Amino acid sequence: MKNMPNPTYDIIIVGAGPAGTSAALFAKRNGLKPLLLEKSVFPRDKICGDALSGKSVRLLRELNLLEKTRGLPGAHIKRITFSGPKYQQFDLYLKGDSEGKNDEGFSIRREIFDEMMFRSVQDADIDTLEGFNVKSVNQENGFVTGVTGIQKESNEEFTFSSKILLGADGYNSIVSKELDLYDMDMEHTSVGIRCYYENVKDLTDQIELHYVPELNPGYLWIFPSDGNRANIGVGLSKDDAKQKKINLVNVMEGILSKPPFAERFSEAKPLEKAKGWNLPLGSIHRKNYGNGFMLLGDAAGIIDPFTGEGIGNALVSGKIAAEIAKQALSVDDNSSNILKAYDTRLWKELGSELKVSTKLQNLAKSKFLLNFVIGRASRNQDIREIISGMLSNEIPKEKLNNPFFYLKILFY
Ligand SMILES: Cc1cc2nc3c(=O)[nH]c(=O)nc-3n(C[C@H](O)[C@H](O)[C@H](O)COP(=O)(O)OP(=O)(O)OC[C@H]3O[C@@H](n4cnc5c(N)ncnc54)[C@H](O)[C@@H]3O)c2cc1C
Protein backbone atom coordinates (compact mmCIF):
# COMPACT_ATOMS: atom_id res chain seq x y z
CA MET A 1 0.00 0.00 0.00
CA LYS A 2 3.02 2.31 -0.12
CA ASN A 3 2.00 5.59 -1.77
CA MET A 4 -1.53 4.30 -2.31
CA PRO A 5 -4.29 6.79 -1.56
CA ASN A 6 -6.26 6.42 1.66
CA PRO A 7 -8.77 3.60 0.99
CA THR A 8 -11.86 5.35 2.49
CA TYR A 9 -13.45 8.26 0.65
CA ASP A 10 -16.72 10.26 0.52
CA ILE A 11 -17.12 9.27 -3.08
CA ILE A 12 -15.27 7.03 -5.51
CA ILE A 13 -15.42 7.93 -9.18
CA VAL A 14 -14.65 5.26 -11.76
CA GLY A 15 -13.40 6.71 -15.07
CA ALA A 16 -11.51 9.95 -15.73
CA GLY A 17 -13.18 11.12 -18.95
CA PRO A 18 -15.16 14.38 -18.98
CA ALA A 19 -17.89 12.99 -16.66
CA GLY A 20 -15.48 11.67 -14.02
CA THR A 21 -13.11 14.64 -13.97
CA SER A 22 -16.05 17.08 -13.80
CA ALA A 23 -17.54 15.08 -10.91
CA ALA A 24 -14.20 15.06 -9.06
CA LEU A 25 -13.69 18.83 -9.43
CA PHE A 26 -17.27 19.71 -8.45
CA ALA A 27 -17.13 17.24 -5.54
CA LYS A 28 -14.01 18.92 -4.18
CA ARG A 29 -15.71 22.30 -4.61
CA ASN A 30 -18.62 20.93 -2.54
CA GLY A 31 -16.23 20.02 0.26
CA LEU A 32 -16.17 16.27 -0.40
CA LYS A 33 -13.20 13.92 -0.46
CA PRO A 34 -13.24 12.07 -3.80
CA LEU A 35 -11.02 9.37 -5.26
CA LEU A 36 -10.76 9.21 -9.05
CA LEU A 37 -9.82 5.83 -10.57
CA GLU A 38 -8.80 5.42 -14.22
CA LYS A 39 -7.72 2.29 -16.05
CA SER A 40 -5.56 4.10 -18.65
CA VAL A 41 -2.47 6.21 -18.07
CA PHE A 42 -2.63 9.79 -19.37
CA PRO A 43 -2.14 10.98 -22.04
CA ARG A 44 -4.49 8.45 -23.61
CA ASP A 45 -6.58 8.55 -26.79
CA LYS A 46 -10.38 8.37 -26.83
CA ILE A 47 -12.19 7.81 -30.12
CA CYS A 48 -14.27 10.95 -30.57
CA GLY A 49 -15.04 13.81 -32.95
CA ASP A 50 -13.30 16.04 -30.35
CA ALA A 51 -15.84 18.89 -30.72
CA LEU A 52 -16.54 20.93 -27.59
CA SER A 53 -19.83 22.79 -27.93
CA GLY A 54 -21.23 25.86 -26.17
CA LYS A 55 -22.47 23.66 -23.32
CA SER A 56 -18.98 22.27 -22.71
CA VAL A 57 -17.64 25.82 -22.80
CA ARG A 58 -20.19 26.89 -20.15
CA LEU A 59 -19.13 24.08 -17.82
CA LEU A 60 -15.42 24.69 -18.45
CA ARG A 61 -16.00 28.35 -17.57
CA GLU A 62 -17.70 27.27 -14.32
CA LEU A 63 -14.71 25.08 -13.54
CA ASN A 64 -12.31 27.98 -14.27
CA LEU A 65 -10.77 25.86 -17.02
CA LEU A 66 -11.81 27.88 -20.06
CA GLU A 67 -8.57 29.84 -20.37
CA LYS A 68 -6.56 26.63 -20.00
CA THR A 69 -8.72 25.04 -22.72
CA ARG A 70 -8.24 28.02 -25.04
CA GLY A 71 -4.47 27.58 -24.64
CA LEU A 72 -4.47 23.92 -25.76
CA PRO A 73 -3.49 22.96 -29.32
CA GLY A 74 -6.69 22.67 -31.34
CA ALA A 75 -9.13 24.62 -33.50
CA HIS A 76 -11.35 27.48 -32.36
CA ILE A 77 -14.91 26.99 -33.65
CA LYS A 78 -17.44 29.69 -34.53
CA ARG A 79 -19.84 27.91 -36.90
CA ILE A 80 -21.54 24.59 -37.58
CA THR A 81 -22.22 23.69 -41.20
CA PHE A 82 -25.01 21.24 -42.02
CA SER A 83 -25.50 19.72 -45.46
CA GLY A 84 -28.24 17.37 -46.68
CA PRO A 85 -28.39 14.42 -49.07
CA LYS A 86 -28.56 16.83 -52.03
CA TYR A 87 -25.56 18.72 -50.62
CA GLN A 88 -27.39 22.02 -50.06
CA GLN A 89 -25.90 23.46 -46.91
CA PHE A 90 -26.34 26.13 -44.27
CA ASP A 91 -24.21 27.53 -41.48
CA LEU A 92 -25.23 28.24 -37.91
CA TYR A 93 -23.08 30.61 -35.89
CA LEU A 94 -22.66 29.48 -32.29
CA LYS A 95 -24.99 31.83 -30.49
CA GLY A 96 -23.98 31.56 -26.88
CA ASP A 97 -26.30 32.48 -24.02
CA SER A 98 -28.35 35.60 -23.29
CA GLU A 99 -25.30 37.29 -21.72
CA GLY A 100 -23.37 36.82 -24.96
CA LYS A 101 -21.11 34.22 -23.35
CA ASN A 102 -20.21 30.73 -24.60
CA ASP A 103 -20.55 31.67 -28.30
CA GLU A 104 -17.47 29.63 -29.18
CA GLY A 105 -16.46 26.02 -29.38
CA PHE A 106 -13.27 24.02 -29.79
CA SER A 107 -11.99 20.95 -31.54
CA ILE A 108 -9.23 19.55 -29.34
CA ARG A 109 -7.90 16.01 -29.54
CA ARG A 110 -9.13 14.02 -26.54
CA GLU A 111 -5.58 12.87 -25.92
CA ILE A 112 -4.86 16.52 -25.08
CA PHE A 113 -8.20 17.69 -23.60
CA ASP A 114 -8.72 14.72 -21.27
CA GLU A 115 -5.17 14.96 -19.97
CA MET A 116 -5.70 18.66 -19.17
CA MET A 117 -8.86 17.72 -17.23
CA PHE A 118 -7.08 14.92 -15.36
CA ARG A 119 -4.07 17.08 -14.43
CA SER A 120 -6.50 19.78 -13.23
CA VAL A 121 -8.03 17.21 -10.87
CA GLN A 122 -4.56 16.38 -9.56
CA ASP A 123 -3.73 20.09 -9.23
CA ALA A 124 -6.85 20.43 -7.06
CA ASP A 125 -5.26 17.98 -4.58
CA ILE A 126 -7.71 15.20 -5.32
CA ASP A 127 -6.47 11.61 -4.93
CA THR A 128 -6.21 9.84 -8.28
CA LEU A 129 -5.02 6.48 -9.48
CA GLU A 130 -4.12 5.85 -13.14
CA GLY A 131 -3.57 2.41 -14.64
CA PHE A 132 -6.14 1.07 -12.17
CA ASN A 133 -8.69 -1.26 -13.76
CA VAL A 134 -11.88 -1.57 -11.68
CA LYS A 135 -12.97 -5.20 -11.86
CA SER A 136 -15.93 -5.39 -9.47
CA VAL A 137 -18.39 -3.32 -7.49
CA ASN A 138 -18.72 -4.36 -3.86
CA GLN A 139 -22.15 -4.47 -2.19
CA GLU A 140 -23.54 -5.17 1.27
CA ASN A 141 -27.22 -5.49 2.16
CA GLY A 142 -28.25 -4.09 -1.21
CA PHE A 143 -25.98 -1.03 -0.97
CA VAL A 144 -22.82 -0.31 -2.95
CA THR A 145 -19.84 -0.10 -0.59
CA GLY A 146 -16.89 0.39 -2.97
CA VAL A 147 -14.84 -1.20 -5.72
CA THR A 148 -12.03 -3.71 -6.20
CA GLY A 149 -9.57 -3.53 -9.05
CA ILE A 150 -6.08 -4.24 -10.27
CA GLN A 151 -3.17 -1.81 -10.42
CA LYS A 152 -1.84 -2.79 -13.83
CA GLU A 153 1.82 -1.95 -13.26
CA SER A 154 2.23 -4.09 -10.14
CA ASN A 155 -0.65 -6.48 -10.86
CA GLU A 156 -1.78 -5.97 -7.24
CA GLU A 157 -5.42 -6.00 -6.19
CA PHE A 158 -6.87 -3.17 -4.09
CA THR A 159 -10.27 -2.42 -2.59
CA PHE A 160 -11.54 1.11 -1.91
CA SER A 161 -14.65 2.02 0.09
CA SER A 162 -17.04 4.94 0.02
CA LYS A 163 -20.67 5.69 0.76
CA ILE A 164 -21.27 6.76 -2.84
CA LEU A 165 -19.87 5.38 -6.10
CA LEU A 166 -20.04 7.31 -9.38
CA GLY A 167 -19.84 5.19 -12.52
CA ALA A 168 -18.25 7.50 -15.11
CA ASP A 169 -16.63 4.67 -17.01
CA GLY A 170 -18.07 5.22 -20.46
CA TYR A 171 -19.97 3.07 -22.95
CA ASN A 172 -18.81 -0.31 -21.64
CA SER A 173 -19.33 0.72 -18.01
CA ILE A 174 -18.23 -2.02 -15.61
CA VAL A 175 -20.19 -0.23 -12.88
CA SER A 176 -23.50 -0.42 -14.77
CA LYS A 177 -22.79 -4.04 -15.78
CA GLU A 178 -22.03 -5.09 -12.20
CA LEU A 179 -25.24 -3.42 -11.03
CA ASP A 180 -27.33 -5.06 -13.79
CA LEU A 181 -28.19 -1.75 -15.43
CA TYR A 182 -26.27 -2.17 -18.68
CA ASP A 183 -28.84 -1.45 -21.37
CA MET A 184 -27.16 -0.34 -24.57
CA ASP A 185 -29.76 -1.59 -27.03
CA MET A 186 -29.06 -1.22 -30.76
CA GLU A 187 -32.01 1.08 -31.38
CA HIS A 188 -30.61 3.73 -29.04
CA THR A 189 -26.91 3.35 -29.77
CA SER A 190 -24.88 4.69 -32.67
CA VAL A 191 -21.52 3.56 -33.93
CA GLY A 192 -18.87 5.94 -35.21
CA ILE A 193 -15.40 5.68 -36.72
CA ARG A 194 -12.75 8.35 -36.54
CA CYS A 195 -9.60 8.92 -38.54
CA TYR A 196 -7.19 11.85 -38.25
CA TYR A 197 -6.06 13.19 -41.64
CA GLU A 198 -3.52 15.81 -42.62
CA ASN A 199 -3.72 18.23 -45.57
CA VAL A 200 -7.51 18.41 -45.87
CA LYS A 201 -8.32 21.60 -47.81
CA ASP A 202 -10.66 24.46 -46.86
CA LEU A 203 -10.75 23.95 -43.10
CA THR A 204 -11.79 27.11 -41.29
CA ASP A 205 -13.52 27.92 -38.00
CA GLN A 206 -16.39 25.53 -38.69
CA ILE A 207 -17.29 22.00 -37.80
CA GLU A 208 -19.17 20.26 -40.58
CA LEU A 209 -21.93 17.66 -40.37
CA HIS A 210 -22.87 16.22 -43.77
CA TYR A 211 -26.00 14.05 -43.91
CA VAL A 212 -24.77 12.27 -47.04
CA PRO A 213 -27.08 9.85 -48.96
CA GLU A 214 -24.66 6.91 -48.59
CA LEU A 215 -25.12 6.95 -44.82
CA ASN A 216 -28.71 8.07 -44.41
CA PRO A 217 -29.75 8.66 -41.62
CA GLY A 218 -26.12 8.94 -40.47
CA TYR A 219 -23.55 11.58 -41.27
CA LEU A 220 -19.96 12.36 -42.17
CA TRP A 221 -18.11 14.89 -40.02
CA ILE A 222 -15.15 17.07 -40.96
CA PHE A 223 -13.69 18.92 -37.98
CA PRO A 224 -10.52 21.02 -38.06
CA SER A 225 -7.96 20.11 -35.40
CA ASP A 226 -4.50 21.28 -34.31
CA GLY A 227 -1.83 22.08 -36.90
CA ASN A 228 -2.54 20.66 -40.30
CA ARG A 229 -4.76 17.94 -38.92
CA ALA A 230 -8.49 17.24 -39.26
CA ASN A 231 -10.75 14.83 -37.42
CA ILE A 232 -12.83 12.93 -39.99
CA GLY A 233 -15.47 10.36 -39.20
CA VAL A 234 -18.86 8.87 -39.88
CA GLY A 235 -21.64 7.91 -37.50
CA LEU A 236 -24.78 5.82 -37.90
CA SER A 237 -27.28 4.03 -35.67
CA LYS A 238 -26.18 0.48 -34.86
CA ASP A 239 -29.53 -0.81 -36.12
CA ASP A 240 -29.02 0.79 -39.53
CA ALA A 241 -25.37 -0.24 -39.75
CA LYS A 242 -26.34 -3.87 -39.09
CA GLN A 243 -29.50 -4.01 -41.21
CA LYS A 244 -27.84 -2.42 -44.23
CA LYS A 245 -24.60 -4.38 -43.57
CA ILE A 246 -22.61 -1.15 -43.85
CA ASN A 247 -18.83 -1.27 -43.54
CA LEU A 248 -18.22 2.21 -42.17
CA VAL A 249 -14.55 2.39 -43.21
CA ASN A 250 -15.31 1.49 -46.84
CA VAL A 251 -18.28 3.84 -46.96
CA MET A 252 -16.26 6.73 -45.52
CA GLU A 253 -13.37 6.20 -47.95
CA GLY A 254 -15.89 6.00 -50.82
CA ILE A 255 -17.57 9.27 -49.82
CA LEU A 256 -14.24 11.09 -49.52
CA SER A 257 -13.08 9.93 -52.94
CA LYS A 258 -16.11 11.35 -54.78
CA PRO A 259 -17.52 14.86 -55.36
CA PRO A 260 -18.21 17.09 -53.53
CA PHE A 261 -15.44 15.97 -51.11
CA ALA A 262 -12.81 14.49 -53.48
CA GLU A 263 -11.12 17.82 -54.30
CA ARG A 264 -10.76 18.71 -50.60
CA PHE A 265 -9.18 15.29 -49.92
CA SER A 266 -7.03 15.13 -53.08
CA GLU A 267 -3.82 15.76 -51.10
CA ALA A 268 -5.03 14.48 -47.74
CA LYS A 269 -3.34 11.55 -45.95
CA PRO A 270 -4.80 9.46 -43.15
CA LEU A 271 -2.57 9.56 -40.08
CA GLU A 272 -3.93 6.33 -38.61
CA LYS A 273 -6.24 3.40 -39.30
CA ALA A 274 -9.88 4.43 -38.74
CA LYS A 275 -11.06 3.33 -35.28
CA GLY A 276 -14.62 2.74 -34.09
CA TRP A 277 -16.53 3.10 -30.82
CA ASN A 278 -20.16 3.23 -29.69
CA LEU A 279 -22.36 6.19 -28.73
CA PRO A 280 -25.14 5.43 -26.21
CA LEU A 281 -27.85 7.94 -27.13
CA GLY A 282 -30.22 9.81 -24.85
CA SER A 283 -33.21 8.89 -27.04
CA ILE A 284 -34.38 6.75 -24.12
CA HIS A 285 -34.27 7.42 -20.42
CA ARG A 286 -32.14 4.71 -18.79
CA LYS A 287 -31.99 4.04 -15.06
CA ASN A 288 -28.95 5.79 -13.62
CA TYR A 289 -29.00 5.54 -9.82
CA GLY A 290 -29.61 3.12 -6.94
CA ASN A 291 -28.53 2.46 -3.35
CA GLY A 292 -25.11 4.07 -3.05
CA PHE A 293 -24.40 4.85 -6.71
CA MET A 294 -25.08 7.07 -9.72
CA LEU A 295 -24.15 6.62 -13.40
CA LEU A 296 -22.73 9.56 -15.35
CA GLY A 297 -21.99 10.53 -18.96
CA ASP A 298 -21.89 7.63 -21.44
CA ALA A 299 -22.42 5.14 -18.62
CA ALA A 300 -25.86 6.78 -18.24
CA GLY A 301 -26.40 6.96 -22.05
CA ILE A 302 -27.06 10.67 -22.52
CA ILE A 303 -25.40 11.51 -25.87
CA ASP A 304 -27.34 13.92 -28.09
CA PRO A 305 -29.05 11.65 -30.67
CA PHE A 306 -28.91 14.21 -33.50
CA THR A 307 -25.40 15.67 -33.24
CA GLY A 308 -23.61 12.84 -31.40
CA GLU A 309 -22.29 15.26 -28.78
CA GLY A 310 -21.74 13.75 -25.37
CA ILE A 311 -18.94 15.73 -23.72
CA GLY A 312 -21.13 18.66 -22.61
CA ASN A 313 -23.78 16.34 -21.15
CA ALA A 314 -21.06 14.30 -19.43
CA LEU A 315 -19.70 17.46 -17.78
CA VAL A 316 -23.23 18.44 -16.69
CA SER A 317 -23.86 14.99 -15.20
CA GLY A 318 -20.60 15.27 -13.19
CA LYS A 319 -21.70 18.58 -11.71
CA ILE A 320 -25.18 17.36 -10.75
CA ALA A 321 -23.92 14.04 -9.33
CA ALA A 322 -21.39 15.87 -7.12
CA GLU A 323 -24.08 18.19 -5.76
CA ILE A 324 -26.51 15.35 -5.06
CA ALA A 325 -23.70 13.33 -3.40
CA LYS A 326 -23.04 16.31 -1.13
CA GLN A 327 -26.74 16.53 -0.18
CA ALA A 328 -26.96 12.78 0.46
CA LEU A 329 -23.84 12.69 2.64
CA SER A 330 -24.94 15.73 4.62
CA VAL A 331 -28.09 13.83 5.76
CA ASP A 332 -26.14 10.56 6.03
CA ASP A 333 -28.47 8.79 3.60
CA ASN A 334 -27.10 7.18 0.42
CA SER A 335 -30.28 5.29 -0.42
CA SER A 336 -31.91 5.38 -3.85
CA ASN A 337 -34.71 7.52 -2.34
CA ILE A 338 -32.21 10.37 -1.98
CA LEU A 339 -30.08 9.66 -5.06
CA LYS A 340 -33.19 9.65 -7.26
CA ALA A 341 -32.83 13.46 -7.13
CA TYR A 342 -29.84 13.03 -9.47
CA ASP A 343 -32.01 11.47 -12.16
CA THR A 344 -34.71 14.11 -11.68
CA ARG A 345 -32.27 17.01 -12.00
CA LEU A 346 -30.30 15.49 -14.86
CA TRP A 347 -33.40 14.93 -16.96
CA LYS A 348 -34.88 18.29 -15.97
CA GLU A 349 -31.76 19.92 -17.36
CA LEU A 350 -31.20 17.73 -20.44
CA GLY A 351 -34.54 16.02 -21.08
CA SER A 352 -36.19 18.60 -23.34
CA GLU A 353 -33.17 19.04 -25.62
CA LEU A 354 -32.69 15.26 -25.82
CA LYS A 355 -36.34 14.97 -26.90
CA VAL A 356 -35.90 17.62 -29.60
CA SER A 357 -32.75 15.92 -30.83
CA THR A 358 -34.58 12.59 -30.95
CA LYS A 359 -37.22 14.27 -33.14
CA LEU A 360 -34.51 15.69 -35.39
CA GLN A 361 -32.83 12.28 -35.53
CA ASN A 362 -36.14 10.77 -36.67
CA LEU A 363 -36.60 13.54 -39.22
CA ALA A 364 -33.14 12.77 -40.60
CA LYS A 365 -34.34 9.22 -41.40
CA SER A 366 -36.36 10.69 -44.28
CA LYS A 367 -34.08 11.92 -47.08
CA PHE A 368 -37.04 13.89 -48.43
CA LEU A 369 -37.67 15.79 -45.18
CA LEU A 370 -33.96 16.32 -44.57
CA ASN A 371 -33.49 17.80 -48.06
CA PHE A 372 -36.59 19.90 -47.60
CA VAL A 373 -35.58 21.36 -44.21
CA ILE A 374 -31.91 21.87 -45.10
CA GLY A 375 -32.92 23.39 -48.44
CA ARG A 376 -35.23 25.83 -46.64
CA ALA A 377 -32.64 26.63 -44.00
CA SER A 378 -30.04 27.31 -46.70
CA ARG A 379 -32.36 29.98 -48.17
CA ASN A 380 -34.11 31.37 -45.10
CA GLN A 381 -32.47 33.11 -42.14
CA ASP A 382 -35.62 32.69 -39.97
CA ILE A 383 -35.48 28.90 -40.33
CA ARG A 384 -31.79 28.97 -39.43
CA GLU A 385 -32.65 30.99 -36.31
CA ILE A 386 -35.32 28.44 -35.32
CA ILE A 387 -32.99 25.46 -35.77
CA SER A 388 -30.24 27.28 -33.93
CA GLY A 389 -32.68 27.99 -31.07
CA MET A 390 -33.74 24.34 -31.01
CA LEU A 391 -30.17 23.10 -30.81
CA SER A 392 -29.14 25.63 -28.17
CA ASN A 393 -32.21 24.86 -26.04
CA GLU A 394 -33.56 28.41 -26.22
CA ILE A 395 -37.02 27.60 -27.51
CA PRO A 396 -39.51 26.91 -24.67
CA LYS A 397 -40.47 23.28 -24.06
CA GLU A 398 -44.20 23.87 -24.67
CA LYS A 399 -43.44 25.11 -28.16
CA LEU A 400 -41.27 22.11 -28.94
CA ASN A 401 -44.01 19.73 -27.86
CA ASN A 402 -46.49 21.35 -30.23
CA PRO A 403 -46.68 19.62 -33.65
CA PHE A 404 -47.59 22.96 -35.33
CA PHE A 405 -44.14 24.21 -34.41
CA TYR A 406 -42.60 21.59 -36.72
CA LEU A 407 -45.10 22.37 -39.48
CA LYS A 408 -43.91 25.95 -39.21
CA ILE A 409 -40.35 24.86 -39.99
CA LEU A 410 -41.58 22.90 -42.99
CA PHE A 411 -43.84 25.60 -44.40
CA TYR A 412 -42.39 28.83 -43.07
C1 LIG B 1 -16.90 8.21 -32.87
C2 LIG B 1 -17.37 9.16 -31.79
C3 LIG B 1 -17.41 10.54 -32.04
C4 LIG B 1 -17.83 11.43 -31.03
N1 LIG B 1 -17.77 12.78 -31.27
C5 LIG B 1 -18.09 13.65 -30.29
C6 LIG B 1 -17.91 15.04 -30.44
O1 LIG B 1 -17.39 15.52 -31.44
N2 LIG B 1 -18.28 15.87 -29.43
C7 LIG B 1 -18.83 15.38 -28.28
O2 LIG B 1 -19.20 16.18 -27.40
N3 LIG B 1 -18.98 14.05 -28.08
C8 LIG B 1 -18.62 13.17 -29.04
N4 LIG B 1 -18.73 11.82 -28.83
C9 LIG B 1 -19.24 11.35 -27.54
C10 LIG B 1 -18.18 11.49 -26.45
O3 LIG B 1 -16.98 10.86 -26.86
C11 LIG B 1 -18.67 10.86 -25.14
O4 LIG B 1 -20.01 11.21 -24.92
C12 LIG B 1 -17.83 11.30 -23.95
O5 LIG B 1 -16.51 10.87 -24.08
C13 LIG B 1 -18.43 10.75 -22.66
O6 LIG B 1 -17.58 11.04 -21.58
P1 LIG B 1 -17.53 10.04 -20.32
O7 LIG B 1 -16.63 10.69 -19.35
O8 LIG B 1 -18.89 9.67 -19.91
O9 LIG B 1 -16.88 8.70 -20.89
P2 LIG B 1 -15.42 8.44 -21.56
O10 LIG B 1 -14.93 9.67 -22.21
O11 LIG B 1 -15.60 7.22 -22.38
O12 LIG B 1 -14.50 8.14 -20.32
C14 LIG B 1 -14.65 6.95 -19.59
C15 LIG B 1 -13.34 6.69 -18.87
O13 LIG B 1 -13.52 5.56 -18.01
C16 LIG B 1 -12.36 4.76 -18.06
N5 LIG B 1 -12.74 3.38 -17.68
C17 LIG B 1 -13.50 2.53 -18.39
N6 LIG B 1 -13.61 1.34 -17.72
C18 LIG B 1 -12.88 1.47 -16.59
C19 LIG B 1 -12.58 0.58 -15.51
N7 LIG B 1 -13.04 -0.68 -15.48
N8 LIG B 1 -11.79 1.03 -14.51
C20 LIG B 1 -11.30 2.30 -14.52
N9 LIG B 1 -11.55 3.18 -15.53
C21 LIG B 1 -12.33 2.76 -16.55
C22 LIG B 1 -11.92 4.86 -19.53
O14 LIG B 1 -10.57 4.50 -19.70
C23 LIG B 1 -12.19 6.34 -19.81
O15 LIG B 1 -11.08 7.14 -19.53
C24 LIG B 1 -18.29 10.92 -29.79
C25 LIG B 1 -18.24 9.54 -29.55
C26 LIG B 1 -17.79 8.67 -30.54
C27 LIG B 1 -17.72 7.19 -30.25
Image (tube, rainbow, N blue to C red):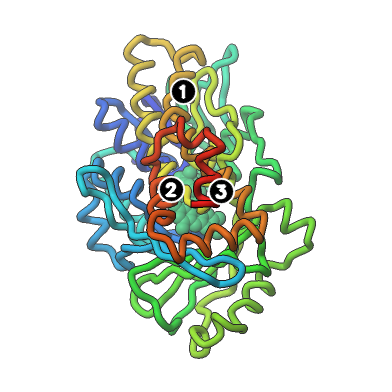
Q: Residue 248 or 160: which is nearer the viewer? A: 248
Quadrant location of the N terminus? top left
What is the CA distance from the residue labelled 3 to the residue labelled 2?
10 Å
SS type, badge 1: helix
Q: Is tag 1's residue or tag 2's residue first in the polypeptide sequence?
A: 1
> Does the closest atom of ligand 1 sit within 8 Å of the Cβ of label 1?
no
**Where on the picture, by quarter, is residue 390?**
top left
Which three-letter amino acid code belongs to the residue tagged 1? Thr
Look at 52% across and 89% down and name the residue there: 266
Q: Residue furthest front?
A: 411
At 68% from the left edge and 69% from the top edge, which residue is drawn?
Answer: 214
Horizontal and vertical percent position of residue 57? 30, 50
Q: Please determine whether, in this image, residue 194 is positioned above or below residue 105.
A: below
Give me the C-alpha separation between circle 1 and circle 2: 22 Å
Helix, strand or loop at disc 3? helix
N-terminal label among 3 and 2:
3
- Whether the residue carrying mark 3 lies under 8 Å from ligand 1 is answered with no
Tell me if 383 is positioned left or right of 282 in this view.
left
Q: Which residue is mark 2?
A: 391
Q: In this orientation, which residue lies closer to the viewer: 260 or 26?
A: 260
Tag 2's secondary structure?
A: helix
Taking the image as shown, residue 121 lies to the left or right of residue 254, namely left
Residue that label 3 marks = 360
Report crowding for label 3: few under 14, some 14 to 19, many 20 or more residues within 10 A (C-alpha): some
Work out whether residue 368 or residue 144 is closer to the camera in this orientation and state it.
368
Residue 202, given in percent of the width and then of the height, sits at: 40, 81
The amino acid marked with disc number 3 is Leu
- Is residue 199 among what the camera can see? yes
